[in-house]
Protein backbone atom coordinates (compact mmCIF):
# COMPACT_ATOMS: atom_id res chain seq x y z
CA UNK A 1 0.00 0.00 0.00
CA UNK A 2 2.85 2.36 0.74
CA UNK A 3 6.15 2.69 -1.04
CA UNK A 4 9.65 3.90 -0.34
CA UNK A 5 12.08 3.19 2.46
CA UNK A 6 10.98 4.42 5.84
CA UNK A 7 12.75 4.63 9.15
CA UNK A 8 10.81 3.06 12.02
CA UNK A 9 10.85 5.30 15.04
CA UNK A 10 8.95 3.11 17.47
CA UNK A 11 7.26 -0.27 17.71
CA UNK A 12 4.08 -1.64 19.19
CA UNK A 13 5.47 -1.02 22.66
CA UNK A 14 4.01 2.16 24.16
CA UNK A 15 6.82 4.45 25.30
CA UNK A 16 5.65 7.02 27.84
CA UNK A 17 9.20 8.31 28.24
CA UNK A 18 8.71 10.11 24.93
CA UNK A 19 6.05 12.24 26.58
CA UNK A 20 8.19 12.90 29.65
CA UNK A 21 11.19 13.95 27.54
CA UNK A 22 9.05 16.37 25.59
CA UNK A 23 7.72 17.85 28.80
CA UNK A 24 11.25 18.28 30.07
CA UNK A 25 12.44 20.21 27.00
CA UNK A 26 9.23 22.16 26.48
CA UNK A 27 10.53 25.42 28.06
CA UNK A 28 13.61 25.31 25.81
CA UNK A 29 11.45 24.78 22.74
CA UNK A 30 9.17 27.67 23.63
CA UNK A 31 12.16 30.02 23.90
CA UNK A 32 14.25 28.84 20.97
CA UNK A 33 11.55 27.73 18.50
CA UNK A 34 8.60 30.09 18.93
CA UNK A 35 7.39 29.78 15.34
CA UNK A 36 7.97 26.09 14.66
CA UNK A 37 5.47 23.50 15.96
CA UNK A 38 7.08 20.29 17.17
CA UNK A 39 5.55 17.34 15.28
CA UNK A 40 5.74 14.83 18.11
CA UNK A 41 4.26 11.36 18.01
CA UNK A 42 0.73 11.69 19.41
CA UNK A 43 -0.33 9.86 22.56
CA UNK A 44 -2.99 7.41 21.37
CA UNK A 45 -5.62 6.01 23.73
CA UNK A 46 -6.64 3.26 23.90
CA UNK A 47 -3.08 2.29 23.01
CA UNK A 48 -3.13 0.24 19.77
CA UNK A 49 -2.06 -3.38 19.91
CA UNK A 50 0.40 -3.16 17.03
CA UNK A 51 1.74 0.29 16.26
CA UNK A 52 4.68 1.28 14.07
CA UNK A 53 5.52 4.94 13.58
CA UNK A 54 7.04 5.96 10.25
CA UNK A 55 8.79 9.09 8.98
CA UNK A 56 5.94 9.76 6.56
CA UNK A 57 3.16 12.26 7.16
CA UNK A 58 -0.03 13.12 5.33
CA UNK A 59 -0.56 16.88 4.78
CA UNK A 60 -4.09 18.20 5.25
CA UNK A 61 -3.56 21.67 3.80
CA UNK A 62 -5.17 21.16 0.36
CA UNK A 63 -8.87 20.22 -0.09
CA UNK A 64 -9.23 16.64 1.02
CA UNK A 65 -11.70 13.81 0.43
CA UNK A 66 -12.76 10.64 2.19
CA UNK A 67 -13.59 7.79 -0.16
CA UNK A 68 -16.35 5.48 1.09
CA UNK A 69 -18.49 3.44 -1.31
CA UNK A 70 -21.13 1.52 0.63
CA UNK A 71 -23.77 3.17 2.81
CA UNK A 72 -22.21 1.67 5.95
CA UNK A 73 -18.81 3.05 4.99
CA UNK A 74 -20.29 6.42 4.14
CA UNK A 75 -22.01 6.75 7.51
CA UNK A 76 -18.68 6.31 9.30
CA UNK A 77 -17.09 8.69 6.80
CA UNK A 78 -19.63 11.33 7.75
CA UNK A 79 -18.64 10.94 11.41
CA UNK A 80 -15.00 11.44 10.39
CA UNK A 81 -15.92 14.46 8.28
CA UNK A 82 -17.85 16.17 11.07
CA UNK A 83 -15.30 15.43 13.78
CA UNK A 84 -12.32 16.42 11.61
CA UNK A 85 -13.89 19.86 11.25
CA UNK A 86 -14.98 20.19 14.88
CA UNK A 87 -11.75 18.98 16.49
CA UNK A 88 -9.13 20.16 14.00
CA UNK A 89 -10.76 22.76 11.76
CA UNK A 90 -9.99 20.60 8.71
CA UNK A 91 -12.63 20.36 6.00
CA UNK A 92 -13.01 17.10 4.11
CA UNK A 93 -15.70 15.91 1.74
CA UNK A 94 -17.08 12.39 1.36
CA UNK A 95 -16.56 10.86 -2.08
CA UNK A 96 -18.75 7.87 -2.95
CA UNK A 97 -17.18 6.87 -6.28
CA UNK A 98 -15.57 3.44 -6.28
CA UNK A 99 -11.90 3.56 -7.24
CA UNK A 100 -11.59 7.29 -6.59
CA UNK A 101 -8.40 8.65 -5.07
CA UNK A 102 -8.76 10.36 -1.73
CA UNK A 103 -6.88 11.62 1.26
CA UNK A 104 -8.57 8.93 3.38
CA UNK A 105 -10.02 5.62 2.20
CA UNK A 106 -12.56 3.79 4.36
CA UNK A 107 -13.38 0.25 3.24
CA UNK A 108 -14.96 -2.88 4.64
CA UNK A 109 -12.82 -5.91 3.91
CA UNK A 110 -15.82 -7.79 2.47
CA UNK A 111 -16.24 -5.30 -0.39
CA UNK A 112 -14.35 -5.47 -3.71
CA UNK A 113 -12.49 -2.25 -2.89
CA UNK A 114 -11.66 -3.47 0.60
CA UNK A 115 -10.23 -6.72 -0.73
CA UNK A 116 -8.00 -4.83 -3.17
CA UNK A 117 -6.70 -2.47 -0.49
CA UNK A 118 -6.07 -5.33 1.93
CA UNK A 119 -4.12 -7.28 -0.70
CA UNK A 120 -1.53 -4.49 -0.94
CA UNK A 121 -1.47 -3.42 2.70
CA UNK A 122 1.91 -3.59 4.44
CA UNK A 123 0.17 -4.91 7.56
CA UNK A 124 -1.79 -7.62 5.81
CA UNK A 125 -0.05 -10.60 7.43
CA UNK A 126 -0.34 -9.06 10.88
CA UNK A 127 -4.01 -8.32 10.21
CA UNK A 128 -4.77 -11.83 9.04
CA UNK A 129 -3.18 -13.25 12.19
CA UNK A 130 -5.07 -11.00 14.61
CA UNK A 131 -8.24 -9.45 13.24
CA UNK A 132 -11.74 -9.91 14.62
CA UNK A 133 -15.11 -8.22 14.12
CA UNK A 134 -14.02 -5.06 15.97
CA UNK A 135 -10.47 -4.86 14.62
CA UNK A 136 -9.17 -2.27 12.20
CA UNK A 137 -6.08 -1.76 10.04
CA UNK A 138 -4.88 1.81 9.53
CA UNK A 139 -1.92 2.86 7.37
CA UNK A 140 -0.91 6.48 6.86
CA UNK A 141 1.62 7.47 4.20
CA UNK A 142 2.64 10.72 2.52
CA UNK A 143 -0.15 10.35 -0.02
CA UNK A 144 -3.12 8.80 1.77
CA UNK A 145 -4.55 7.14 4.87
CA UNK A 146 -6.25 3.78 4.34
CA UNK A 147 -8.58 2.38 6.99
CA UNK A 148 -9.89 -1.20 6.70
CA UNK A 149 -12.16 -3.22 8.97
CA UNK A 150 -14.50 -6.20 8.89
CA UNK A 151 -17.40 -4.17 10.33
CA UNK A 152 -18.64 -0.57 10.50
CA UNK A 153 -17.86 -0.67 14.21
CA UNK A 154 -14.24 -1.50 13.43
CA UNK A 155 -14.14 1.39 10.95
CA UNK A 156 -15.47 3.73 13.64
CA UNK A 157 -12.71 2.63 16.04
CA UNK A 158 -10.15 3.32 13.34
CA UNK A 159 -11.66 6.78 12.87
CA UNK A 160 -11.26 7.47 16.60
CA UNK A 161 -7.57 6.63 16.28
CA UNK A 162 -7.13 8.57 13.02
CA UNK A 163 -8.52 11.70 14.66
CA UNK A 164 -5.85 11.39 17.36
CA UNK A 165 -3.11 11.19 14.72
CA UNK A 166 -3.90 14.69 13.44
CA UNK A 167 -1.40 17.30 14.61
CA UNK A 168 0.02 20.68 13.64
CA UNK A 169 2.70 20.48 10.95
CA UNK A 170 6.20 21.82 11.55
CA UNK A 171 5.34 25.19 10.04
CA UNK A 172 2.60 25.70 12.58
CA UNK A 173 0.34 26.91 9.77
CA UNK A 174 -1.32 23.67 8.75
CA UNK A 175 -2.32 20.21 9.91
CA UNK A 176 -1.07 16.75 9.06
CA UNK A 177 -1.64 13.11 9.96
CA UNK A 178 1.29 11.37 11.60
CA UNK A 179 2.60 8.41 9.62
CA UNK A 180 1.84 5.05 11.18
CA UNK A 181 0.90 1.44 10.54
CA UNK A 182 -1.63 0.06 13.00
CA UNK A 183 -3.41 -3.24 13.51
CA UNK A 184 -5.68 -2.93 16.51
CA UNK A 185 -8.42 -4.89 18.31
CA UNK A 186 -9.93 -5.01 21.82
CA UNK A 187 -9.19 -7.37 24.69
CA UNK A 188 -12.71 -7.55 26.16
CA UNK A 189 -15.68 -8.07 23.86
CA UNK A 190 -18.31 -6.17 25.91
CA UNK A 191 -17.34 -2.63 26.94
CA UNK A 192 -20.36 -0.81 28.30
CA UNK A 193 -21.20 2.31 30.28
CA UNK A 194 -24.22 2.45 32.59
CA UNK A 195 -25.90 5.88 32.77
CA UNK A 196 -28.74 6.86 35.08
CA UNK A 197 -31.31 9.47 34.09
CA UNK A 198 -32.85 10.94 37.25
CA UNK A 199 -35.58 13.59 37.16
CA UNK A 200 -32.87 16.24 37.61
CA UNK A 201 -30.42 14.81 35.05
CA UNK A 202 -29.58 17.08 32.13
CA UNK A 203 -29.65 15.24 28.81
CA UNK A 204 -26.61 17.22 27.66
CA UNK A 205 -24.62 15.41 30.36
CA UNK A 206 -25.88 12.06 29.06
CA UNK A 207 -24.88 13.07 25.53
CA UNK A 208 -21.42 14.07 26.75
CA UNK A 209 -20.95 10.72 28.47
CA UNK A 210 -22.01 8.75 25.38
CA UNK A 211 -19.61 10.73 23.20
CA UNK A 212 -16.75 10.25 25.64
CA UNK A 213 -17.44 6.51 25.89
CA UNK A 214 -17.38 6.25 22.09
CA UNK A 215 -14.09 8.17 22.02
CA UNK A 216 -12.59 5.44 24.21
CA UNK A 217 -14.06 2.66 22.06
CA UNK A 218 -16.93 1.46 24.25
CA UNK A 219 -19.46 -0.61 22.34
CA UNK A 220 -22.52 -0.43 24.60
CA UNK A 221 -24.57 2.08 26.60
CA UNK A 222 -27.04 1.04 29.30
CA UNK A 223 -29.57 3.75 30.20
CA UNK A 224 -31.63 3.45 33.38
CA UNK A 225 -34.57 5.80 33.90
CA UNK A 226 -35.46 6.63 37.50
CA UNK A 227 -39.07 7.89 37.33
CA UNK A 228 -37.79 10.26 34.64
CA UNK A 229 -39.36 8.87 31.45
CA UNK A 230 -43.01 9.35 30.58
CA UNK A 231 -44.97 6.17 30.00
CA UNK A 232 -48.12 6.15 27.90
CA UNK A 233 -49.26 2.83 29.36
CA UNK A 234 -48.13 3.45 32.94
CA UNK A 235 -48.17 7.21 33.51
CA UNK A 236 -48.02 6.76 37.30
CA UNK A 237 -44.38 5.62 37.04
CA UNK A 238 -42.96 9.06 36.15
CA UNK A 239 -43.06 12.44 37.83
CA UNK A 240 -44.65 15.46 36.18
CA UNK A 241 -42.32 17.11 33.72
CA UNK A 242 -40.45 13.85 33.05
CA UNK A 243 -38.68 13.44 29.73
CA UNK A 244 -40.69 12.27 26.75
CA UNK A 245 -39.60 9.42 24.48
CA UNK A 246 -39.05 12.00 21.72
CA UNK A 247 -36.53 13.80 23.95
CA UNK A 248 -34.65 10.57 24.65
CA UNK A 249 -34.67 9.22 21.09
CA UNK A 250 -31.80 11.45 19.81
CA UNK A 251 -29.51 9.95 22.47
CA UNK A 252 -30.36 6.45 21.29
CA UNK A 253 -29.75 7.49 17.69
CA UNK A 254 -26.43 9.03 18.75
CA UNK A 255 -25.33 5.70 20.17
CA UNK A 256 -26.42 3.93 16.99
CA UNK A 257 -24.44 6.42 14.89
CA UNK A 258 -21.40 5.54 17.01
CA UNK A 259 -22.08 1.80 16.54
CA UNK A 260 -22.87 1.15 20.18
CA UNK A 261 -25.45 -1.29 21.52
CA UNK A 262 -28.14 0.82 23.17
CA UNK A 263 -29.57 -1.09 26.14
CA UNK A 264 -32.57 -0.11 28.28
CA UNK A 265 -32.77 -0.95 31.97
CA UNK A 266 -35.63 -1.24 34.45
CA UNK A 267 -35.18 -2.49 37.99
CA UNK A 268 -37.49 -5.46 38.41
CA UNK A 269 -37.24 -6.49 42.07
CA UNK A 270 -35.56 -4.06 44.45
CA UNK A 271 -35.50 -0.30 43.82
CA UNK A 272 -39.17 -0.49 42.88
CA UNK A 273 -39.69 2.94 44.43
CA UNK A 274 -38.33 4.52 41.28
CA UNK A 275 -36.03 6.77 43.28
CA UNK A 276 -32.95 6.49 45.45
CA UNK A 277 -33.35 5.31 49.05
CA UNK A 278 -31.89 8.56 50.37
CA UNK A 279 -34.65 10.68 48.87
CA UNK A 280 -37.44 8.89 50.74
CA UNK A 281 -39.59 9.47 47.66
CA UNK A 282 -41.74 6.84 45.98
CA UNK A 283 -42.86 7.78 42.48
CA UNK A 284 -46.05 5.71 42.68
CA UNK A 285 -47.12 5.40 46.33
CA UNK A 286 -46.63 9.04 47.25
CA UNK A 287 -49.27 9.93 44.65
CA UNK A 288 -51.31 6.75 44.21
CA UNK A 289 -51.46 4.94 47.57
CA UNK A 290 -54.15 2.66 46.20
CA UNK A 291 -51.43 0.83 44.27
CA UNK A 292 -49.69 -0.36 47.42
CA UNK A 293 -50.48 -3.98 46.58
CA UNK A 294 -47.78 -3.91 43.87
CA UNK A 295 -45.06 -3.48 46.48
CA UNK A 296 -43.79 -4.80 49.74
CA UNK A 297 -45.00 -2.96 52.81
CA UNK A 298 -42.17 -0.43 52.74
CA UNK A 299 -42.49 0.04 48.97
CA UNK A 300 -38.88 -0.78 48.22
CA UNK A 301 -39.34 -4.06 46.32
CA UNK A 302 -42.04 -5.44 44.09
CA UNK A 303 -44.44 -7.88 45.78
CA UNK A 304 -43.50 -11.08 43.98
CA UNK A 305 -46.72 -12.90 44.86
CA UNK A 306 -48.95 -10.29 43.20
CA UNK A 307 -49.42 -11.16 39.50
CA UNK A 308 -50.47 -7.56 38.80
CA UNK A 309 -46.80 -6.50 38.94
CA UNK A 310 -46.27 -8.16 35.55
CA UNK A 311 -48.91 -6.02 33.89
CA UNK A 312 -46.90 -2.98 34.91
CA UNK A 313 -43.45 -4.44 34.28
CA UNK A 314 -44.28 -5.91 30.87
CA UNK A 315 -45.96 -2.72 29.69
CA UNK A 316 -42.88 -0.73 30.67
CA UNK A 317 -40.53 -3.30 29.14
CA UNK A 318 -42.35 -3.18 25.83
CA UNK A 319 -42.33 0.61 25.72
CA UNK A 320 -38.59 0.65 26.37
CA UNK A 321 -38.00 -2.04 23.75
CA UNK A 322 -39.86 0.04 21.19
CA UNK A 323 -38.03 3.24 22.15
CA UNK A 324 -34.66 1.51 21.89
CA UNK A 325 -35.62 0.02 18.52
CA UNK A 326 -35.72 -3.63 19.62
CA UNK A 327 -32.29 -3.93 21.28
CA UNK A 328 -30.28 -7.11 21.67
CA UNK A 329 -30.02 -6.74 25.45
CA UNK A 330 -32.10 -5.61 28.42
CA UNK A 331 -30.89 -4.97 31.98
CA UNK A 332 -33.32 -6.24 34.62
CA UNK A 333 -31.51 -4.77 37.63
CA UNK A 334 -32.56 -7.16 40.47
CA UNK A 335 -30.18 -5.68 43.06
CA UNK A 336 -30.55 -4.62 46.68
CA UNK A 337 -33.93 -6.18 47.38
CA UNK A 338 -33.74 -4.84 50.92
CA UNK A 339 -36.83 -6.73 52.06
CA UNK A 340 -34.88 -9.94 51.89
CA UNK A 341 -32.46 -8.70 54.55
CA UNK A 342 -35.37 -9.09 56.96
CA UNK A 343 -36.72 -5.54 56.64
CA UNK A 344 -40.00 -6.62 55.10
CA UNK A 345 -42.84 -6.15 57.57
CA UNK A 346 -45.36 -8.52 56.02
CA UNK A 347 -45.09 -12.07 54.73
CA UNK A 348 -47.71 -11.93 51.99
CA UNK A 349 -45.10 -11.12 49.34
CA UNK A 350 -42.98 -14.15 50.23
CA UNK A 351 -45.51 -16.90 49.62
CA UNK A 352 -45.52 -20.27 51.33
CA UNK A 353 -42.26 -21.23 49.57
CA UNK A 354 -40.04 -18.12 49.22
CA UNK A 355 -37.54 -19.85 46.93
CA UNK A 356 -40.31 -21.00 44.62
CA UNK A 357 -41.75 -17.47 44.59
CA UNK A 358 -38.44 -15.96 43.57
CA UNK A 359 -37.56 -18.62 41.00
CA UNK A 360 -40.96 -18.18 39.36
CA UNK A 361 -40.39 -14.42 39.15
CA UNK A 362 -36.93 -14.74 37.63
CA UNK A 363 -37.96 -17.29 35.04
CA UNK A 364 -41.10 -15.34 34.08
CA UNK A 365 -39.00 -12.26 33.35
CA UNK A 366 -36.38 -14.29 31.50
CA UNK A 367 -39.00 -15.97 29.27
CA UNK A 368 -40.56 -12.60 28.41
CA UNK A 369 -37.29 -11.54 26.81
CA UNK A 370 -36.22 -14.93 25.49
CA UNK A 371 -39.36 -14.99 23.31
CA UNK A 372 -38.12 -11.73 21.82
CA UNK A 373 -34.57 -13.03 21.33
CA UNK A 374 -33.22 -10.54 23.88
CA UNK A 375 -30.47 -11.42 26.36
CA UNK A 376 -30.77 -10.04 29.88
CA UNK A 377 -28.36 -8.63 32.44
CA UNK A 378 -28.82 -8.91 36.21
CA UNK A 379 -26.79 -7.42 39.06
CA UNK A 380 -25.02 -10.10 41.05
CA UNK A 381 -25.58 -9.20 44.70
CA UNK A 382 -28.84 -11.02 45.51
CA UNK A 383 -27.27 -14.27 44.32
CA UNK A 384 -24.42 -14.22 46.84
CA UNK A 385 -24.89 -15.68 50.33
CA UNK A 386 -24.49 -12.82 52.78
CA UNK A 387 -22.52 -14.76 55.38
CA UNK A 388 -20.28 -16.55 52.88
CA UNK A 389 -16.69 -16.28 54.22
CA UNK A 390 -15.16 -15.03 50.95
CA UNK A 391 -18.01 -13.97 48.68
CA UNK A 392 -20.52 -12.34 51.01
CA UNK A 393 -19.11 -8.85 51.39
CA UNK A 394 -19.02 -5.45 49.70
CA UNK A 395 -22.74 -5.57 48.84
CA UNK A 396 -25.36 -4.14 51.20
CA UNK A 397 -28.09 -6.72 50.58
CA UNK A 398 -27.22 -10.28 49.46
CA UNK A 399 -29.07 -13.54 50.04
CA UNK A 400 -30.41 -14.45 53.49
CA UNK A 401 -33.18 -16.71 54.79
CA UNK A 402 -36.02 -17.28 54.15
CA UNK A 403 -35.58 -16.56 50.44
CA UNK A 404 -31.99 -17.85 50.14
CA UNK A 405 -31.92 -16.26 46.72
CA UNK A 406 -28.39 -17.54 46.06
CA UNK A 407 -29.85 -21.03 45.71
CA UNK A 408 -31.87 -19.89 42.70
CA UNK A 409 -28.69 -19.45 40.70
CA UNK A 410 -28.29 -23.09 39.71
CA UNK A 411 -31.80 -23.19 38.21
CA UNK A 412 -31.41 -20.08 36.06
CA UNK A 413 -30.55 -20.15 32.33
CA UNK A 414 -26.82 -19.89 31.76
CA UNK A 415 -27.05 -17.12 29.17
CA UNK A 416 -28.12 -14.54 31.76
CA UNK A 417 -25.29 -12.01 31.96
CA UNK A 418 -24.18 -11.36 35.52
CA UNK A 419 -23.09 -7.79 36.27
CA UNK A 420 -20.72 -8.15 39.23
CA UNK A 421 -20.30 -4.79 40.95
CA UNK A 422 -18.21 -3.41 43.75
CA UNK A 423 -16.88 0.08 44.14
CA UNK A 424 -14.16 -0.21 46.79
CA UNK A 425 -12.13 -3.40 46.44
CA UNK A 426 -8.61 -2.96 45.06
CA UNK A 427 -7.38 -6.49 45.78
CA UNK A 428 -8.35 -9.66 43.99
CA UNK A 429 -12.15 -10.08 44.25
CA UNK A 430 -13.40 -13.68 43.91
CA UNK A 431 -17.04 -12.94 42.97
CA UNK A 432 -16.60 -12.58 39.16
CA UNK A 433 -14.72 -15.87 39.07
CA UNK A 434 -17.45 -17.55 41.12
CA UNK A 435 -20.15 -16.72 38.58
CA UNK A 436 -17.80 -17.48 35.69
CA UNK A 437 -17.15 -20.95 37.13
CA UNK A 438 -20.91 -21.43 37.44
CA UNK A 439 -21.11 -21.04 33.66
CA UNK A 440 -22.49 -17.50 33.40
CA UNK A 441 -21.12 -14.71 31.19
CA UNK A 442 -19.84 -11.98 33.52
CA UNK A 443 -19.14 -8.28 33.25
CA UNK A 444 -17.29 -6.48 36.04
CA UNK A 445 -18.71 -3.14 37.17
CA UNK A 446 -16.47 -0.47 38.73
CA UNK A 447 -17.59 3.07 39.50
CA UNK A 448 -15.46 6.17 40.05
CA UNK A 449 -12.34 4.92 41.86
CA UNK A 450 -9.30 4.35 39.66
CA UNK A 451 -7.64 1.59 41.71
CA UNK A 452 -10.96 -0.28 41.95
CA UNK A 453 -11.36 -0.08 38.17
CA UNK A 454 -7.81 -1.32 37.64
CA UNK A 455 -8.38 -4.29 39.94
CA UNK A 456 -11.70 -5.31 38.37
CA UNK A 457 -10.40 -4.93 34.81
CA UNK A 458 -7.35 -7.03 35.63
CA UNK A 459 -9.68 -9.73 36.93
CA UNK A 460 -11.84 -9.55 33.80
CA UNK A 461 -8.84 -9.86 31.50
CA UNK A 462 -7.09 -12.58 33.50
CA UNK A 463 -10.27 -14.71 33.58
CA UNK A 464 -11.23 -13.85 29.98
CA UNK A 465 -14.65 -12.63 31.11
CA UNK A 466 -17.23 -11.15 28.78
CA UNK A 467 -16.29 -7.59 29.68
CA UNK A 468 -17.03 -4.52 31.75
CA UNK A 469 -19.95 -2.23 32.54
CA UNK A 470 -18.61 1.04 33.93
CA UNK A 471 -21.22 2.59 36.25
CA UNK A 472 -21.77 6.29 36.91
CA UNK A 473 -24.90 6.46 39.12
CA UNK A 474 -25.52 9.91 40.64
CA UNK A 475 -22.02 11.22 39.93
CA UNK A 476 -21.92 11.25 36.15
CA UNK A 477 -19.53 14.19 35.83
CA UNK A 478 -17.20 12.96 38.57
CA UNK A 479 -17.06 9.52 36.95
CA UNK A 480 -15.93 10.68 33.50
CA UNK A 481 -12.15 10.25 34.09
CA UNK A 482 -12.80 6.67 35.22
CA UNK A 483 -14.97 6.13 32.13
CA UNK A 484 -11.93 7.02 30.04
CA UNK A 485 -9.53 4.93 32.12
CA UNK A 486 -11.84 1.91 32.08
CA UNK A 487 -12.21 2.16 28.30
CA UNK A 488 -8.44 2.04 27.88
CA UNK A 489 -8.07 -0.89 30.26
CA UNK A 490 -10.88 -2.86 28.58
CA UNK A 491 -9.23 -2.45 25.18
CA UNK A 492 -5.60 -3.17 26.04
CA UNK A 493 -3.79 -6.41 26.73
CA UNK A 494 -3.43 -7.85 30.26
CA UNK A 495 -0.73 -6.08 32.22
CA UNK A 496 -1.16 -2.66 30.58
CA UNK A 497 -0.02 0.02 33.02
CA UNK A 498 -2.57 2.80 33.24
CA UNK A 499 -0.10 4.96 35.17
CA UNK A 500 1.79 5.57 31.93
CA UNK A 501 -1.03 7.82 30.73
CA UNK A 502 -0.97 11.25 32.46
CA UNK A 503 -4.19 12.23 34.20
CA UNK A 504 -4.41 15.48 32.27
CA UNK A 505 -4.78 13.38 29.12
CA UNK A 506 -8.18 12.20 30.39
CA UNK A 507 -9.15 15.74 31.24
CA UNK A 508 -8.14 16.88 27.76
CA UNK A 509 -10.33 14.20 26.21
CA UNK A 510 -13.29 15.29 28.36
CA UNK A 511 -12.76 18.91 27.31
CA UNK A 512 -13.11 17.80 23.70
CA UNK A 513 -16.78 17.27 24.56
CA UNK A 514 -17.84 20.49 26.28
CA UNK A 515 -21.22 20.33 27.94
CA UNK A 516 -22.43 23.06 25.58
CA UNK A 517 -22.55 22.78 21.80
CA UNK A 518 -22.06 19.01 21.85
CA UNK A 519 -21.88 17.36 18.42
CA UNK A 520 -25.08 15.82 17.11
CA UNK A 521 -23.48 12.90 15.33
CA UNK A 522 -26.81 11.08 15.10
CA UNK A 523 -27.36 13.21 12.00
CA UNK A 524 -24.75 11.07 10.22
CA UNK A 525 -27.28 8.22 10.15
CA UNK A 526 -28.85 10.02 7.19
CA UNK A 527 -27.39 12.08 4.42
Image (cartoon, helix red, strand yellow):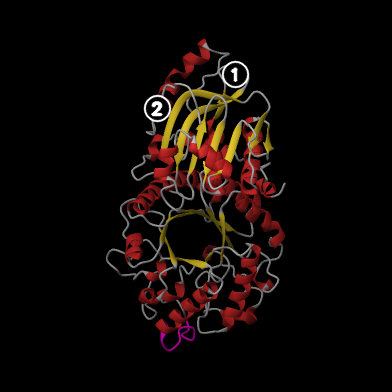
Dot 1 or dot 2: first in sequence order is 2
Residue that appears at 68% across and 39% down = 97
- Residue range in magenta is 345-354
Q: Residue most toward the left? A: 389
Q: Secondary structure at mark 2?
A: loop
Q: Locate residue 458 relative to residue 140 in the image: left or right.
A: left
Q: Position of residue 225 (x, y in %)?
A: 60, 62
Residue that appears at 34% across and 62% down = 431
Q: Locate residue 257 relative to residue 441 in the image: left or right.
A: right
- 10 Å crowding of disc 2: few (<14), some (14-19), many (20+): some
Q: CA distance from mark 1 to mark 2?
A: 24 Å
Which is nearer the eye, 145 or 362? 145
Residue that appears at 57% across and 51% down = 259
Q: Position of residue 76 (x, y in %)?
A: 61, 44
Residue that appears at 54% across and 34% down = 164
Q: Secondary structure at mark 1?
A: loop
> In this rendering, is residue 421 above or below 213?
below
Q: Locate residue 91 relative to residue 425 in the image: left or right.
A: right
Mark on residue 172? 1
Can residue 82 be seen in the rendering of this structure?
yes
Q: Position of residue 307 (x, y in %)?
A: 56, 84
Amino acid sequence: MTSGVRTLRSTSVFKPQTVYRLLAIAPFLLVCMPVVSLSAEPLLTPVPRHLTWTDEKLPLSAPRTVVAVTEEEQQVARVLRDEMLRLHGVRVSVQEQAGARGTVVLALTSTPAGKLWLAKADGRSLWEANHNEEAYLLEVSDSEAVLLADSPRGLLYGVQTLLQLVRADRSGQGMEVAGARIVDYPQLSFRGIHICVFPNTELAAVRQAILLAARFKYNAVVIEFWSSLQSAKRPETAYGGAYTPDQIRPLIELGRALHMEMIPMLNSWGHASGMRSRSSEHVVLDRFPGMKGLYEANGWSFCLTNPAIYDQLFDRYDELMELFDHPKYFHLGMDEAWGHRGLMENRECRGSDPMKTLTHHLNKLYQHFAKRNVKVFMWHDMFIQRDHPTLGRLSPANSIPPFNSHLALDSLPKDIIIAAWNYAEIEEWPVPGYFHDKGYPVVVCPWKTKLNAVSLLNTAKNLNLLGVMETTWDSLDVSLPTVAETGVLAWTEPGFELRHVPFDHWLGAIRQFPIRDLPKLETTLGR
